[in-house]
Image (cartoon, rainbow, N blue to C red):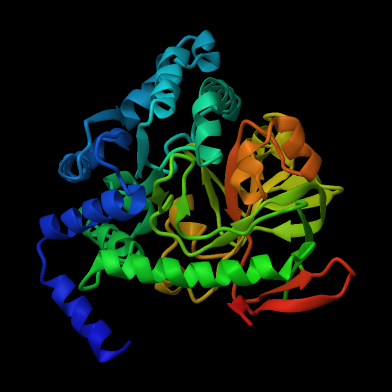
């Protein structure tokens, strides 16, 4: 670490927690959303995130938001459904609410989600019921999710440290110390522990764009992942007319936003029928309150034909049975092992962070914006290029310090992109 970086960290440490939280809120609004004066903002958050919600709401109104509407989730209330709800409850979702949120997006509202729910909340619940709820919610929110995956609106996700999440990340610490440590990890990973976080994000975005431009110029037909231990030997064919993306993006409404805070990835759309080989997850997956560990799957002609896990295997198999597209890939992303999140040594048990610690793949829905002209195509046109369609989009990590990645050219030749997890 340079002298200037040490000085910046020292200066950041001297700030009060409220000042640090305010920095995160400012970055969420100015960088994450790029919120425009006159926009509405729809925000979802766990109830423990109330202090951050209030800071973000303040910055949103300062930026000219015409209205901020907040929706809260509460872990005990969610558990009460599984403990006392009638069987019919698990196939039900508030369609009226999701239709309203979709209508807000169509009328120009921005979307911000605060992550922080207990990753293990539903680990002790019946996986069949968890799956039924997930399917019902996915169907109900399909309209709104399509607007997000098509990047029609400006949206972002930031994180908030909560007690149950913190205890999972730092199990040997008293809860108050665990929360404090998790907050500091979030601040560092979110790149606000610097003198000027907004400028830092602008510079970081520019570096990601350089990498994206290089990948788009190469026009690889596939990526080949191979780990030193032999547990991953996977060829991911890329969709016809694919586009790489990373960092910020200009949404369909013309607003430049940073969808994920933090972000370290360059990603694109795989071809749904051209994925073959075996792959082993390098980190656990936290999905809808359940933990899935040591995922190992085999693909043939784009489809998962075999899937195992040392924990949460039933949840995994129900997940990939959501619909036809759930067994196929909708995203592939490259992340260097030297990313700040990987180097922190912290396993966040949260995809927003852990996916930015390692190269990863995502089951389910593809991003149409990762295809040339894709945002203007209908479902049939997207499918013809190889883009996958599904009710789900679930990222899981496969990269590590022992992973090599080669870009495969249309003529079958290849060239190294990553060695031992680092860009060549």
Q: Position of residue 244 (x, y in %)?
A: 62, 59
For the point 34% across and 47% down, the residue is 33
For the point 17% across and 71% down, the residue is 12
The number of numbered badges drawn on the structure is 0
Q: Position of residue 334 (x, y in %)?
A: 60, 65
For the point 61% across and 75% down, the residue is 421
In the image: residue 389, left or right of residue 199: right
Name which quarter of the figure residue 365 lies in.
top right
The reply to whether residue 367 is visible in this rendering is no
Residue 412 in the image: above or below residue 287 = below
In the image: residue 343, left or right of residue 139: left
Q: Position of residue 205 (x, y in %)?
A: 43, 66
Front-most of 49 and 83? 49
Q: Position of residue 107 (x, y in %)?
A: 39, 25
Name the quadrant of the C terminus.
Answer: bottom right
The reply to whether residue 297 is visible in this rendering is yes
């Amino acid at each position: 670490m340079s002298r200037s970086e040490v000085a910046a960290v020292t200066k950041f440490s001297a700030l009060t927690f409220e000042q640090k939280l305010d920095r995160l809120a400012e970055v969420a609004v100015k960088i994450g959303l790029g919120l425009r004066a006159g926009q509405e903002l729809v925000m979802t958050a766990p109830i423990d995130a109330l202090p951050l919600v209030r800071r973000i709401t303040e910055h949103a109104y300062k930026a000219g938001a015409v209205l901020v509407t907040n929706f809260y989730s509460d872990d005990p209330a969610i558990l009460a459904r599984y403990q006392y709800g009638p069987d019919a409850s698990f196939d039900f979702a508030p369609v009226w609410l999701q239709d309203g949120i979709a209508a807000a997006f169509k009328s120009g509202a921005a979307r911000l989600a605060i992550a922080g729910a207990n990753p293990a909340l539903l680990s002790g619940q019946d996986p069949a019921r968890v799956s039924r709820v997930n399917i019902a919610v996915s169907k109900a929110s399909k309209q709104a999710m399509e607007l997000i995956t098509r990047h029609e609106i400006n949206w972002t996700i930031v994180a908030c440290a909560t007690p149950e999440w913190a205890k999972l990340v730092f199990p040997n610490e008293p809860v108050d110390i665990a929360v404090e440590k998790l907050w500091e990890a979030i601040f560092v990973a979110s790149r606000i522990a610097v003198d000027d976080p907004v400028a830092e994000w602008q510079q970081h975005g520019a570096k990601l764009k350089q990498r994206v431009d290089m990948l788009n110029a190469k026009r690889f037909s596939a990526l080949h992942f191979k780990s030193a231990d032999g547990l991953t030997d996977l060829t991911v064919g890329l969709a016809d007319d694919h586009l790489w993306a990373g960092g910020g993006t200009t949404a369909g409404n013309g607003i430049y936003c940073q969808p994920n805070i933090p972000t370290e990835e360059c990603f694109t759309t795989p071809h749904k029928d051209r994925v073959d080989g075996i792959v082993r997850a390098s980190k656990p997956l936290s999905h809808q309150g359940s933990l899935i560990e040591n995922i190992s799957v085999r693909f043939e002609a784009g489809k998962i034909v075999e899937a195992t896990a040392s924990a949460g295997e039933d949840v995994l198999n129900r997940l990939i049975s959501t619909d036809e597209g759930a067994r196929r890939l909708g995203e592939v992303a490259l992340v260097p092992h030297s990313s700040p999140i990987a180097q922190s040594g912290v396993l966040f048990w949260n995809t927003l962070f852990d996916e930015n610690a390692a190269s990863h793949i995502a089951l389910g829905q593809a991003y149409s914006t990762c295809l040339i002209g894709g945002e203007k195509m209908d479902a049939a046109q997207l499918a013809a290029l190889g883009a996958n369609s599904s009710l789900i989009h679930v990222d899981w990590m496969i990269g590590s310090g022992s992973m090599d990645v080669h870009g495969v050219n249309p003529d079958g030749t290849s060239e190294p992109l990553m060695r031992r997890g680092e860009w060549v």
